Every structure is written in structure tokens, then in C-alpha cells.
Image (cartoon, helix red, strand yellow):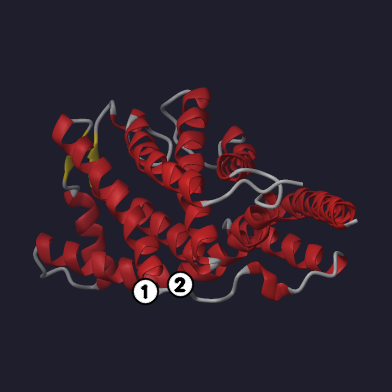
């Protein structure tokens, strides 16, 4: 009798999860179209990022899910610091390789000159303005980016990862959530709104997908380990600001650079993949396989 009830309960959970995921993805697609249109109206990607959060909230309302289930608890500070420092370490390590091998050079004097003018600190030395810029990006720019990043992460790590974990192993959760997140960016890359103008599209799609999926593995581990959505928000924001606002612009690019730097190049993708393998092994060892 108990076994029959357990089977019925598991079947209910499986059906509930399937309906929730179907509802979520349906609204993600619908709101993606709206967000894509708003990119041209507003000249920025924030509406597209927030569209995922809106899809999540609507899904929770329709499926009668509590918004509290998305993982608002803060968790242990050490995991939040890990979420902030891991993407910095990946970017720093990747760009050290880029600079050492010669796929790009440190540092871009023109970029620093522009920052001096932007900050109205033209009398400062290059070293001083670089350190000042890093501090501002690592603090103020990071905080300013949190709302739009939260919009995305409500969906990917707030709802999707926990739902997938109900019937998938950690390997499945990490790879599926990471791949979904990657594919979500593809239309922008295919239309030429995101990426570079040097390397072939297939090359950019491959290494971008490798980078984002690897990142998704790490973020899935932190989300399931802590139960906190904030690990994903912090990780995502940290990765964005350090790559896009510090390491890529400070690099002097040559004819080969686009093949190796940024989110569309090989070096940072392979570096992130190595780190992801470590967290994948931890996840496989620590999280039991959920069965329906």
C-alpha cells in the first residue's frame, strides 16, 4: 500500500514538473520575442534579460507556485564569495594565457586614455586609472548589473535547475540548464547583435556554448549546494563585468585575438570547461539521482 502511494506521489511530481517546465518554456519563447523587439526600441539587452524573470513569475502564478520557492535565502557567505571570485579567477587565468602566448597584449593604452577622459582624471597615471577602473567595475558596475542579471537567473537557476533536479541526475541538470541558457543567446548571435565580426559564426557558437554550458555546470552546483538563487546572480554578474568591462577591453588585440579572447573565443571557454569538470565531479559525488 505504501509503495503504491509512493508511486502515485512520484507520478504527481513528474506530471507537475512537466507542466511547470512546459509553461515556463512557453512563456520564455513568448516574452523573448517581446524582449527582442525592445532591444531595438531601447538600444540595450536589459528587457531581454528581464523577460526570463517575467516568464518565471507568470509560470509561478499559473502553476500556483510560491515565489519563495525560487531560492531567495542567502545561504553561507563563503559560497557567495566563491560565486564572485570563481568567474574572476577564470577570466584572469584565461587572459594571462592570452597575454603570455601572444594572442593579445597587456595593456591597451587607448582604452585607459578613454577612461581617464570619462572619469575626468586625465592627470592620473595609467596604473592608477587602471586600478581605479577595476575597483569601480568590481563594486559599482557589479551592483548596477544585478537587477537585469536577477531577471535572467530567476528562470535559469531559480526555477529551471530545481525543476530538472526532480527527475535528472546532476549531470543532466547541469548540462541541460547550461545548454538551454546557451541556446537562448543564439538568435542574437545569428543576427549579428552579439559576438564579433572576425571569426565564423559556427566557431563563435561552439566556443560560446562551451563557455556558457561550463559556466552553467558551476552555477548549477552552487545553486543546488546552497539552495540560494543569489549564488547564480552573483556569479553571472561577476563574470559579465570582469570579462566585458575589464579583461577584454584592457587587452590589445591583434589579427588572432578574436579567435581566443572574450566569451566567443577558445581560451576562456576551455579554462571555464576545466573548472566545470571539477565542479561536475563534486556534483556527481554529492547529489543523489532523483527518480520519478
Q: Quadrant of residue 190?
A: top right
Q: Position of residue 268 (x, y in %)?
A: 34, 39
Tag 1 secondary structure? helix
Q: Secondary structure at mark 2?
A: helix
Residue lying furthest front = 1
Q: Where, by quadrant of the figure, is residue 137 drawn?
A: bottom left
Closest to the observer: 273 or 285? 285
Q: How many marks?
A: 2
Residue 249 showing in the rendered view: no
Question: In the rendered image of this protein, does residue 200 appear above or below residue 18?
Answer: above
User: Is 102 on the left-hand or right-hand side of 186?
Assistant: left
Residue 108 appears in view: yes
**Rendered residue at 48%/51% (across/down):** 286
Relative side of 253 to 191, left or right: left
User: Considering depth in this image, is 270 or 2 the residue closer to the camera?
Assistant: 2
Q: Which mark is residue 144?
A: 2
Q: Name the disc covering residue 209, or none.
A: none
Give x and y (percent) for residue 9: 85, 57
Rendering coords of residue 156 (x, y %): 62, 55
Q: CB under 8 Å between callouts 2 and 1?
A: yes
Q: Which residue is at a point 76% across and 55% down the rendered structure image? A: 31
Give the residue displayed 45% in from the left and 43% down from the top: 280
User: According to the image, label 1 marks what residue?
Assistant: 140
* Left or right: residue 254 compared with residue 29: left
- Which one is in front, 154 or 219? 219
Crowdedness of circle 2 by 10 Å Cα count: few (<14), some, many (20+)? few
- Against 116, residue 176 (above or below) is above
Tell me: residue 224, above or below residue 139.
above
Position of 134 relative to 214 (above/below): below
Quarter of the image that includes the N terminus:
bottom right
Along the horizontal axis of the image, is 49 left or right of 262? right
Distance from disc 2 to disc 1, alpha carbons, whole Å, reads 6 Å
Amino acid at each position: 500500500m505504501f509503495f503504491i502511494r509512493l508511486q502515485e506521489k512520484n507520478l504527481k511530481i513528474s506530471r507537475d514538473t512537466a507542466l511547470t517546465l512546459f509553461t515556463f518554456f512557453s512563456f520564455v519563447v513568448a516574452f523573448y520575442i517581446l524582449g527582442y523587439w525592445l532591444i531595438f526600441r531601447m538600444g540595450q539587452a536589459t528587457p531581454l534579460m528581464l523577460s526570463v524573470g517575467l516568464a518565471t513569475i507568470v509560470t509561478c502564478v499559473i502553476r500556483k507556485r510560491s515565489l519563495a520557492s525560487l531560492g531567495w535565502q542567502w545561504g553561507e557567505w563563503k559560497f557567495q564569495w566563491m560565486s564572485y571570485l570563481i568567474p574572476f579567477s577564470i577570466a584572469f587565468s584565461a587572459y594571462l594565457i592570452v597575454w603570455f602566448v601572444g594572442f593579445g597584449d597587456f595593456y591597451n593604452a587607448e582604452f585607459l586614455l578613454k577612461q581617464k577622459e570619462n572619469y575626468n582624471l586625465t592627470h592620473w597615471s595609467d596604473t592608477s586609472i587602471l586600478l581605479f577602473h577595476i575597483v569601480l567595475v568590481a563594486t559599482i558596475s557589479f551592483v548596477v548589473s544585478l537587477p537585469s542579471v536577477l531577471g535572467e537567473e530567476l528562470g535559469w537557476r531559480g526555477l529551471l535547475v530545481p525543476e530538472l533536479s526532480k527527475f535528472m541526475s546532476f549531470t543532466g541538470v547541469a548540462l541541460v540548464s547550461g545548454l538551454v541558457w546557451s541556446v537562448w543567446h543564439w538568435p542574437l548571435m545569428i543576427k549579428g547583435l552579439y559576438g564579433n565580426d572576425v571569426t565564423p559564426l559556427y566557431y563563435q557558437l561552439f566556443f560560446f556554448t562551451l563557455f556558457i554550458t561550463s559556466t552553467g555546470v558551476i552555477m548549477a552546483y552552487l545553486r543546488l549546494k546552497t539552495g540560494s538563487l543569489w549564488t547564480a546572480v552573483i556569479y553571472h554578474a561577476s563574470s559579465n563585468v570582469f570579462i566585458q568591462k575589464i579583461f577584454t577591453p584592457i587587452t590589445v588585440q591583434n589579427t588572432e585575438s578574436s579567435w581566443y579572447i572574450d566569451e566567443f573565443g577558445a581560451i576562456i571557454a576551455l579554462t571555464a570547461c576545466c573548472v566545470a569538470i571539477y565542479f561536475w565531479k563534486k556534483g556527481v559525488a554529492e547529489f543523489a539521482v532523483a527518480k520519478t
